[in-house]
Amino acid sequence: MGIGNSLLDIGHSKNLGFEIMLSKKTSNTIAGIAFLSPNIIGFLCFTTIPLVFSMVLAFSNWDLTLHNMFHDEAIKFVGLKNFIRLFQERDFWKFLGNTLFLMMGAPFAIAGSLIAAILLNKDLKGKKSGVFKIILPGAILFISCVMLTLVGMGAAALTILIVGAVGMTLISGILFGQTVYRTLFYLPNFTSGVAVYILWKKLYSPQTGPVNAVLDKPVSVVGNIVNATPSWVLLAGEWLCLLIGLFIMMKVLKSLFNHWKEGDIGSCGLVLALFFVMLPAFFAILWAPTAAMKLAVPAIAVVLLVFHLATDLKTRDFPCTIWHGVGSGFMIAMISLIPMFMFIGFAAAIAHLADITRQTDFSVLPPPEWLASYDWAKPAIMIMGLWMAIGSNNMLLYLAGLSNVPPELEEAADIDGASPFQKFWHVTWPQLAPITFFIVVMTVIGGLQGGFEMARTMTQGGPFGSTTTLSYFIYNEGFATGRLGYSSAISWVLFIMVFSITMINWKFGSKYVND
Amino acid sequence: MAILAVLILVTIGTAMVNKQTSSGKPVIYWVTDNNPARALQINTFQAWMKKKGYPDCELKLDTANRDVSKQIIQSVSGVGGDVMDCWSGGGDIMYFAEMGIMEDVTEDAKKLGFDPSKTFPSLEDDLKVGGKQYIFPCNVGASMYFVNCEVFKRFGLETPPMTWDIAEFERRGKEFVEVANKGLERRMFFMAENIDMISTMRSYGNDVFNETLTRSRMTGEGNEGYLKALKLNKKWIEEYHLIPSAAEVQSFSTDSGYGGATLQLFFKGNFAMVNIGRYALIQFRQFGTMDLDAVQYPNGGYPNTIIATRAALVYKGGKNKDLAKYFLAYLASEDYNMNIVNDADALPPNPEYTRTEEYLHPKDYPNEWKVHKKFAQDAVDISIVLTKSPFVANKRVYSYLDDARQAVLSKKQTPEESVKYCETRINEEIDRNLLEKPKLRPEYDKQLELQKKIDEYRKTGRKIPKDWISNPYHKKYYKDMGWLETEKNANIQ
């Protein structure tokens, strides 16, 4: 009995221990859930449920004027009607175009934040020789500007102030090191979006804003030069720009086919890259100034492509799978698009400038009307976006990434005699690939979803809908007409676009990062 | 645990402190703008309620939710303010009525004395939707051109006449900008800050919609009003520079106060005239003394102006609807109206008070005496509300009209293309609405039948029965032209 009892006791104590263990585990789980629950509940209430709800709405005819607590009309399931209507709506395509156009600034913004991060990663601190060196010239500058303004020379004061501010910033950096620049560059991020937009609205004021005050003289000079230039020289300039664009295209095509031959890019990657590389040639049909150019540019581009297809597809040194290197092909195409579009744009700009100087009743070329002009409103917003992006979180991410680049790699490159650019291209840039990938994904998502605050604050979507983005369109549909079902359908189409692009990025971009 | 305890204590403390500030009386929340005049209006309301022996209550301002999108979301969710301001101009009333968030106050208005007879007759079409009254004006705006007489004097020119046609405006405008801008590096002086596109269109005998509000009718022979307005706007901005371009306005603008920088620029003389309601006097009085006059918009044959109101509605889901209705009655009272008269916050809701000496000749502002009577007179004689069709989202309509104007000025469309675009978009929107809201169809078909009859009658030169017409513009225009057969009723099944 005693033995039996003691065995029982042991068994009991074992069970007890197990129970204690179990209850410990359970209590740990409960504690974990309890700590997470505020977040989970918040996420469920304010994200998941509205998300599911909006998805249901997208297939319904929910209209605030028909369905609310004061109307008992039943909400009907309308199937894909909202989506079909959306794709038939001319505004949708226009506003999608606006959104994509504004996103064209994204590569520049990413490049800007990278350049800013590289600059800020270098310590420019010079010999410290006293705060007075910055305060004294600052005070003199400020007093001079006030005096100039008082005697009615506001424009001159403004120019001096801007030049002086830039100079002072440089001096501050030399005196106090990179911290000054890092703080200054990151400042826009501390300011609320709406305040920044209002500030930029003032900066863009066509006749009294500082931007045009600074641009006024240089633009006049350009106008005078354009006026004085014989028309055949301008035409030659336009051709030259287009030919440079085509030359870049030729080089990129050659490089892409070489990559394909060497097995760096598979057939799918090549096709995708070729599609993008050929785009500027077709945009030239819209943008090129003369009919001859509209015809010649795409024709030359097609000839180049056919030539490469005929000569380079015959042999392949290192075969690979068709999906291999899609990300690399895409990146090469994207990078090459920037200079190609730039040169086609230059050609169009030369022609446009000549037109304006001929048409204007002023003796000099007027600076842009920015937000008041249909053609300039979008570029104005892009420029502002670029300014905001340079000092954004992207810059901080790049800064963090740069500090993680192993110094031994750079030292090795130095020993091998690499130039600063080679060091950047072969050492730093590959090390930054994961960060770049993350930034690209976030920028694309932000770009597709963005534009609402800017449009509402700066332009109300005008002139003539030129700055209305998809997000502003969703708001207008929802609140100006009460069509919440339709508005949700637009949101879901936007989501599908964001999701698809992100998936493509993950599928191919992450490979590129890991490579 | 300690943190939790502190939080609980703070919560209890906050609740207790707030309890002390509450008077215990029923509270009416008034969703309105953050205007300094509201404090006095609240005090007057409390005193008026007491004087009248109405139930004791407290009126509190809710200035954070005046945005229309907030009003909509809160109202359809059951948490709207008891009394809400709404602007009749852009079609909010029609929109709110469609949503059913406004309390029908027709019967109470008769009982408490704030029915349409207590305000400007031309506003009736804005106060009622489907024959039911939903709102009463807080103040009334009938726009005219304010004239800065000193500017004309400064350049040795005559002040414009009260009524003038397009050619006269153009002649005087060209003369003004030539004299005023002589020798300047860039144009600094303009005849007016803008033209009213709708009034200009209407002055040619046309409106956005037809007589029964079933279709937009802006193209075709005899309907060129908006086309003419677009062409004039373009010519006056780009060719004659009588009014500033969007870029010139932005260059001036500092966006402060009502009407942005426009009023300061008017005071300084950059704009010889500004197109605005009488409420602009609130700011003019702050600027200093300025010799003011008011003139009508130049017209293409039919002088007219637009009348609109910032009105108050009673929220259907409110807890204190009965008390809120007293607030609307208060808006018709002498106490409130004299507040508006003295503040110069547009026209008082009740036109009776525009005949008082305080309104016509305010003691401290003799420089304004030429202005007051003209505003009141025009609100009675030539004003018409903006047309709103029950078959379309009216905000869309006015945004299409503005799009058309911007498209022409941006050189993206010719005026002809632009008007066609606008008409097509509005009619497409009507068709879409009818598809989505089949309940509208019977009434729409009935109105279409009437429209056919009207068109037939018009062709043969016969007079039209008044009841056939729903469009407030056509009601007045046809009446003034003598085209109405007032006694006959429509009898179409």
Image: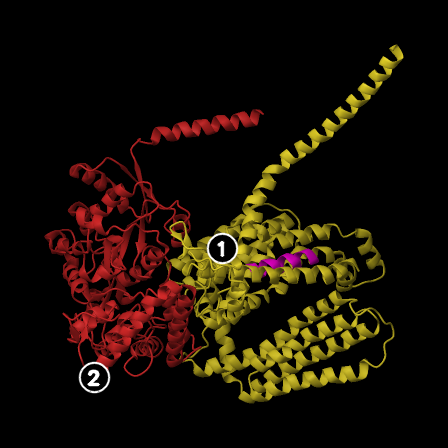
Chain colours: A yellow, B red
Residue under the image location 58 percent in, 51 percent down: A186
Amino acid under label 2? Answer: Thr
In the figure, is residue B190 to the left or right of B475? right
Q: Quadrant of the C terminus of chain B?
A: bottom left
Disc 2 on helix, strand or loop?
A: helix
Where residue B145 sits in the image (x, y, percent)? 23, 66
Tell me, yes or no, whether the two marked residues, 1 and 2, touch with CB atoms within 8 Å: no
Please give the range of residues in magenta: A437-449
In-front residue for pair A475/A294:
A475
The residue that label 2 is drawn on is B460
Disc 1 on helix, strand or loop?
A: helix
Q: Residues within 10 Å of mark 1 (few under 14, many from 20)?
A: some
Please say if B278 is above or below B423: above
Can you see residue B195?
no
The residue that label 1 is drawn on is A196
- Name the image quarter holding residue A9: top right
- Name the image quarter holding residue B239: bottom left
Please say if A460 is above or below B72: below
Please identify, in this view, whether the residue under mark 1 or under mark 2 is nearer the observer. 2
In-front residue for pair B468/A227:
B468
Can you see residue B36?
yes
Where residue B300 sits in the image (x, y, percent)? 23, 77
> Mark 1 — on which chain does it sit?
A
Q: Is residue A441 magenta?
A: yes
Please say if B101 is above or below A234: above
Cα–Cα span, label 1 and label 2: 61 Å
Q: Quadrant of the N terminus of chain B?
A: top right
Q: How many marks?
A: 2
Q: Residues within 10 Å of mark 2 (few under 14, many from 20)?
A: few
In-front residue for pair B372/B185:
B372
Q: What's the magenta bit mostly, secondary-structure-wise?
A: helix
